[in-house]
Image (cartoon, grey):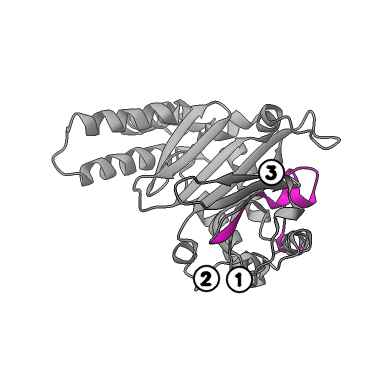
Amino acid sequence: MYDKVKLWVMRTRDTPDVSNFLDKAKDHVDHETGEVCTFGSLEGLKVSVYTGGISIIGSLAKFIYPNNIYPLDRHGTRQAITKLSDCLHLDVSDARVTSMEFGQVFVMRHPVESYLSKLGDTPKLLRYHFDVGTLYYKPKSPRQHKVLAFYDKKADAGVKGMVLPDGFDDANLLKYEMRFNGRLPQQMNVPEVVASTLSENGFYRLMVKKYQENYFAISKLNQVKTDIMSEIKTVSDAFDVLVARLINQSDQTQIAAFMEELKEAKVFDDRKSYTRLKKKIQDVATKAGVTVSDELVRELDDEIKNVGVYV
């Protein structure tokens, strides 16, 4: 399930020159310092050789497979690191991981945008729905280094000119991935994260757990019961049904925009009031007896749960 990573290999006097093994390697001279850097590629990976170290950036999945549609598990990750070491004639197992993506593509029954519209807010991250096929959850604070991304993988592949495997041309491909950038040991609460760490059983299980927990922390839109009319007994019941229906049928972006409008106008003196309002909206939208779990949400829930079955 690993995809794009950024690796940093420290250089010493004993580190071999890897520039001879790169494709289209070009030297760049800093005229102020005299430092010579080499930039090249290796089967799709971007490799930059500096005086102090070697930067390797790219998709490990594409490095060993024709594309990144199929998930790269910990065994495939070990193969990718071994292949990278062989190609560079340099052991990169101790390379520091400074950034990584962890995700999977799911084949869904309906168009991707139908599922994205069901995903609401999540704690500590802001929801950004740039277009119908792309949804991001980005940090509220610059001290946070995690992004959640949901998007139409088939559309993404088309933009990048990537050929889909046979049988996927008419499929609805939804990709959900976590993106971690910087301070990985602190984010994962582990002593270090190096290339060999990615294929360790314990660390991989930790990543799957975080993958699932981050997804299930997102609020979901429900469906109002189809037979709810027979359960309405009072004016309050009718009001709850109406509000729940309006919330669950609305665009989540409109609700988020309204919350931001309130904040910009400084409507409440106490910032906790905005949190209480958001919770009240969620409580009404998911009120027991009024709504039931949405069919599309259940389908995506099941896909995320099944990710951890064969860890």
Name the image quarter holding the C terminus. bottom right
Q: Residues within 10 Å of mark 1 (few under 14, many from 20)?
A: few
Tell me the amino acid under the disc marked 3. Answer: Val
Taking the magenta stretch, the answer to whether it contains residue 235 is no
User: Depth check: 85 or 99 in front?
Assistant: 85
User: Depth check: 278 or 188 in front?
Assistant: 188
Q: Residue 276 location in percent, x, y?
A: 26, 44
Q: Residue 304 location in percent, x, y?
A: 63, 51
Q: Are marks 3 and 2 in contact (CB under 8 Å)?
A: no
Which one is earlier in the sequence, the residue at label 3 or at label 2?
3
Q: Which mark is residue 165?
A: none
Q: Kindly identify which residue carries mark 1.
A: 13
Q: Residue 199 location in percent, x, y?
A: 68, 66
Tell me the amino acid under the disc marked 1. Answer: Arg
Q: Which mark is residue 192?
A: 2
Q: Which mark is residue 105?
A: 3
Q: Indicate the secondary structure of the residue bearing disc 1.
A: loop
Q: Above or below — where is 217 with respect to 106?
A: below
The CA span between labels 3 and 2 is 28 Å
Q: Residues within 10 Å of mark 3 (few under 14, many from 20)?
A: many
Q: Indicate the secondary structure of the residue bearing disc 3.
A: strand
Q: Is residue 12 left or right of residue 25?
A: left
Which region is colored magenta? Answer: 52-75
Q: Above or below — where is 36 with respect to 76?
A: above
Which one is earlier in the sequence, the residue at label 2 or at label 1?
1
- Which residue reaches farthest right? 166
Residue at 70% from the left image edge and 68% from the top image edge? 91
Q: Indicate the secondary structure of the residue bearing disc 2.
A: loop
Q: Answer yes or no: is residue 147 visible.
A: yes
Residue at 42% from the left image edge and 46% from the top image edge? 122
User: Depth check: 67 or 167 in front?
Assistant: 67
